[in-house]
């Protein structure tokens, strides 16, 4: 197959970038999108052009390292990460635009590589259950209804890629934050810290400059892990309760 | 040189307890004085970083990914073993211990494996407490499934994403400690060398992958939790970035590398489809709980649609050869059997390199919805990659490189022969012998990180009071300078070939000569070819751009340079071991039925290799394996 690529090239975080035109020739339909870029990069190297820099690691859809916007959509057409996107999904001869994830809180470092440390700081603000190794009771001492465990797992499946914030017109990270708040909040082990967690994670999210949710649901549409936007509503509810408690002086 | 594994005295099942009763302790106020360097943030690294920080040590943790949550432990699918016996099916600590020793073809250290089995139960408790959403039954209690090499159901799982959930658990604990200021996290920072001061590991040299800056960090102990070296084969189920550099650099600084020839080829991966391919995708072993593996009995049928091949024309070869374990035979055996039928010309799919994994019977028995619930995400992944629907047509699978049982040599304390250097998880050699059982890697990574090292590190630390090294000691400058020189050398070669082309060539050579089956002739050929390829690499590599910023070709080049040396060590070890055991199958040594033929008289030892300088053959140091509890037996899964 053959493709005409428009690829975002940017030398440094502070430099300006632009789309460069490259041709992708002799691409097998079975190749993944990233393997297509690998082939193009081999070709560019031969021609003496610096290869396109992009993040990837596991290449099986779980590590969350991919950060490409393809034809305007984070991770491109279909559900799943960029590494799980295969060239047979495209038309032979198609023009494909490749940009990094676009969100104010994810500054571009080079070409298609973005900095997602903001998500790290949100996690550090409260995305955990305080527990010391060695202090746990027997695993079966607290039964958890299957439906609850299953729903917690639905939320825990988030891969932290950042596509939600990149897709959102407000650059909101609420799908990401709500997934963690829901995952830990549903489980009996996480409940003691629910109020503290939701308040500090949401506040950190605001501090990082992510926008608010205005029910556009682009996040849900692009999420490779299938995290539903209804978790955002759940988070808003927890947040309201926790902030009311806080404002009337109930200790949390 | 002799190796002392420092195994505690006493009966096997009391060793760990007596170790803990008498281990040296460091009081909390003193722990604050120690800086611990941890390289890697997967299950072993993140668990160790979080736990040591909880105890009061000052921790610096490094990873090459942009977040510790992306370490490749995240990709483990199937599950984690524990001897809880929640199923009341006869499981016990002893049985998990014995299965693991047997699965490893009697080439692992008894005391380490028993400790692992003992700790397994605590891991599950720990993970549940930190919010890992394991699969549950309607009554609210934990569910289990079976894995290869076991006749009990002892595997805990979270859909097909167990590794992800366990890593997120460890990562959340790590994030907590970062927030508390107990761990300083360095992401996108790659270890380039180990710093050894007066014979002790006291620091590392790292490269900041964003701005290219090379610097050193001093510490009181160094923990390598850097995973395995499967990517030496280029195509593997490892992540693109997985590499041997940290452990290989430590080897070049004096740490012994043990059993590098023990590599695991996983039986259920999606077959290779072309030259362009950058990695192979695993289909979890758990699929073998319900899927049946077969190929046509006659070569003529291979091109037919599977549906058109009647039941009596199919060869369910695992069920035929190993009736008591059937499709759940251990990985090495299943992989070799797949190779055998394909070598026999009965493979299916492109190039005849594939076998069927068929769910038709399970769907008939349980209904599609049950299979969907159990393996939905795997079927989806398979569909994505191959464009085929595995509910309708059997999956095509083929073995692929997956895991490294070999690694740096460590004693019972997880410390290498270099004092201060500790090695955890897949990066060490200690627990899986010559073959790892499914769902045991997660168990070992977390055991090492949460429960072993927090108890054993004190042994070394207690001897280090008042011995802080000077971060400006000459050893640091020497190491930084040598790393800088090497990076400049790589970027200055200015040849014509890309990094990947060298890596692919090395990988293909190793897969052909040192893959699922090995022989003397092939290994000698590889040992002749690798140095030539290495020479070409250092004279004809082409890397564009500079070393002062993000340059992924440069990053890969450094890793491939180490693979090009390490590959030789791997073949050398395989050539030295004149027997077949577990993942190491030498075609000269097999039973008439084609099973691995061990030679306990001559090879019942850990082969630990000592670096003697570039161009010099390494020295073999043997650690004899002493079996006090288990009788060596021929593995049988029939």
Image (cartoon, rainbow, N blue to C red):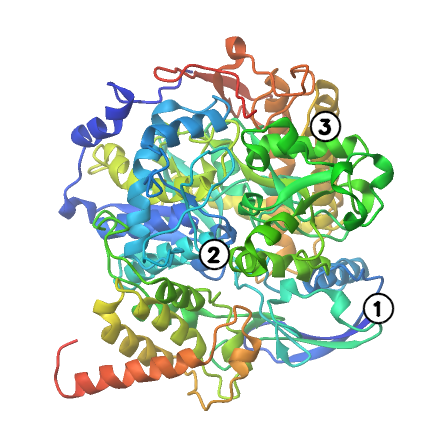
Q: Find disc 2 in the rendering and name its residue.
A: B159
Q: Find disc 1 in the rendering and name its residue.
A: A2
**10 Å crowding of disc 2: few (<14), some (14-19), many (20+):** many
Helix, strand or loop status at disc 3: helix
**Relative to B69, is B277 on the left or the right?**
right
What residue is at 80 percent from the left and 58 percent from the top?
A46
Seen in the picture, residue B581 relative to A179 is either above or below; the reply is above
Q: Looking at the rendering, in which quadrant would you find the C terminus of chain A? A: bottom left
Comparing B21 with B440, the one in front is B440
Q: Which is closer to the viewer, label 1 or label 2?
A: 2
Seen in the picture, residue B557 relative to A236 is either above or below; the reply is above
The residue at the far top in this view is: B601
**10 Å crowding of disc 1: few (<14), some (14-19), many (20+):** some
Q: Which is closer to the viewer, label 3 or label 2?
A: 2
Seen in the picture, residue B351 relative to B430 is either above or below; the reply is below
Q: Find disc 3 in the rendering and name its residue.
A: B526
**Relative to B247, is B182 on the left or the right?**
left
- Tell me the subunit letter for badge 1: A
- Tell me the subunit letter for badge 2: B
Nearer-N-terminus badge (3/2): 2
Q: Position of residue A222 (x, y in %)?
A: 57, 76
The residue at the far right in this view is: B300
- Tell me the subunit letter for badge 3: B
Q: Position of residue B555 (x, y in %)?
A: 59, 52
Q: Which is closer to the viewer, label 1 or label 3?
A: 1
What residue is at 65 percent from the left and 15 percent from the top?
B591
């Amino acid at each position: 197959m053959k493709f005409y690529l428009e690829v975002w090239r940017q030398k440094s975080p502070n430099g300006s970038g632009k789309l460069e035109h490259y041709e992708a020739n002799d691409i097998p339909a079975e190749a993944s999108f990233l393997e297509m870029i690998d082939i193009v990069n081999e070709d560019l190297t031969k021609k003496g052009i610096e290869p396109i820099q992009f993040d990837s690691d596991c290449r099986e859809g779980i590590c969350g390292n991919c950060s490409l916007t393809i034809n305007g959509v984070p991770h491109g057409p279909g559900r799943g990460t960029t590494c799980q996107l295969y060239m047979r999904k495209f038309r032979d001869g198609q023009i494909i635009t490749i940009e990094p994830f676009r969100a104010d809180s994810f500054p571009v470092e080079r070409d298609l590589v973005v900095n997602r440390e903001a998500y790290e700081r949100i996690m550090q603000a409260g995305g955990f259950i305080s527990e010391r190794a060695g202090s746990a009771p027997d695993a079966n001492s607290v039964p958890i209804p299957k439906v609850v465990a299953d729903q917690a797992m639905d939320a825990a499946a988030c891969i932290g890629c950042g596509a939600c914030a990149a897709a959102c017109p407000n650059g909101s990270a609420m799908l990401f934050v709500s997934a963690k708040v829901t995952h830990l909040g549903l489980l009996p082990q996480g409940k003691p810290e629910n109020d503290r967690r939701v308040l500090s994670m949401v506040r950190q999210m605001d501090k990082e400059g992510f926008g608010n949710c205005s029910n556009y649901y682009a996040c849900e549409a692009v999420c490779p892990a299938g995290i539903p936007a209804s978790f955002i509503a759940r988070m808003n509810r927890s947040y309201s309760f926790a902030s009311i408690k806080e404002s009337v002086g109930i200790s949390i | 040189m002799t190796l002392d594994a420092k195994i505690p005295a006493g009966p096997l099942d009391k060793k760990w307890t007596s170790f803990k009763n008498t281990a040296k302790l460091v009081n909390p106020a003193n722990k604050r004085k120690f800086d611990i360097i941890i390289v890697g943030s997967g299950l072993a690294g993140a668990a160790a970083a979080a736990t040591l920080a909880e105890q009061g040590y000052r921790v610096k943790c490094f990873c090459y990914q942009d977040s510790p949550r992306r370490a490749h432990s995240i990709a483990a699918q199937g599950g984690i073993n524990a001897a809880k016996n929640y199923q009341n099916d006869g499981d016990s600590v002893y049985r998990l211990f014995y299965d693991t020793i047997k699965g490893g073809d009697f080439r692992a250290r008894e005391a380490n494996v028993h400790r692992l089995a003992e700790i397994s139960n605590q891991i599950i408790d720990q993970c549940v407490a930190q919010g890992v959403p394991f699969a549950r039954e309607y009554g609210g209690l934990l569910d289990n499934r079976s894995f290869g090499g076991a006749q009990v159901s002892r595997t805990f799982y979270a859909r097909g994403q167990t590794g992800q959930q366990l890593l997120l658990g460890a990562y959340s604990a790590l994030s907590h400690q970062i927030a508390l200021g107990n761990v300083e996290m360095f992401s996108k920072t790659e270890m380039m060398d180990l710093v050894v001061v007066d014979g002790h590991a006291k620091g590392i040299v790292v490269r900041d992958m964003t701005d290219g800056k090379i610097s050193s960090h001093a510490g009181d102990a160094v923990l390598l939790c850097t995973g395995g070296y499967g990517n030496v084969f280029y195509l593997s189920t490892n992540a693109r970035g997985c590499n041997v550099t940290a452990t290989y650099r430590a080897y070049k600084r004096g740490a012994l590398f043990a059993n590098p020839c023990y590599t695991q080829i996983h039986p259920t991966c999606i077959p290779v489809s072309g030259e362009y391919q950058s990695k192979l995708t695993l289909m979890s072993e758990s699929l073998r709980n319900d899927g049946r593996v077969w190929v046509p009995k006659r070569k003529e049928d291979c091109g037919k649609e599977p549906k058109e091949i009647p039941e009596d024309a199919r060869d369910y070869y695992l069920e035929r050869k190993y009736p008591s374990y059937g499709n759940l035979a251990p990985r090495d055996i299943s992989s070799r059997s797949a190779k055998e039928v394909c070598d026999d010309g009965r493979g299916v799919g492109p190039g005849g390199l594939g076998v069927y994994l068929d769910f038709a019977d399970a769907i008939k028995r349980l209904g599609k919805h049950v299979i969907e619930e159990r393996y939905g995400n795997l079927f989806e992944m398979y569909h994505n990659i191959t464009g085929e629907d595995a509910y309708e047509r059997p999956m095509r699978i083929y073995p692929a490189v997956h895991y490294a049982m070999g690694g740096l040599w460590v004693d019972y304390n997880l410390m290498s022969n270099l004092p201060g250097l500790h090695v955890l998880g897949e990066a060490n050699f200690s627990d899986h012998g010559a073959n790892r059982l499914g769902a045991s890697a997660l168990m070992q990574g977390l055991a090492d990180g949460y429960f072993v090292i927090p108890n054993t590190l004190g042994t070394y630390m207690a001897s280090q009071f008042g011995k802080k090294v000077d971060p400006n000691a000459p050893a640091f400058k020497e190491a930084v300078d040598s790393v800088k020189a090497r990076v400049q050398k790589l970027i200055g070669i200015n040849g014509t070939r890309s990094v990947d082309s060298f890596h692919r060539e090395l990988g293909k050579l190793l897969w052909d000569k040192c893959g699922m089956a090995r022989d003397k002739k092939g290994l000698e050929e590889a040992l002749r070819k690798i140095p030539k390829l290495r020479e070409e690499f250092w004279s004809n590599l082409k890397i564009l751009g500079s070393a002062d910023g993000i340059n992924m070709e440069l990053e890969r080049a450094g890793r491939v340079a180490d693979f090009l040396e390490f590959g030789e060590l791997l073949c050398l070890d395989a050539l030295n071991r004149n027997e077949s055991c577990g993942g190491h199958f030498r075609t000269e040594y097999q039973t008439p039925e084609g099973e691995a033929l061990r030679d306990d008289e001559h090879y019942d030892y850990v082969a630990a290799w000592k670096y003697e300088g570039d161009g010099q053959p390494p020295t073999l140091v043997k650690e004899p394996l002493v079996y006090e509890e288990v009788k060596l037996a021929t593995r049988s899964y029939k």
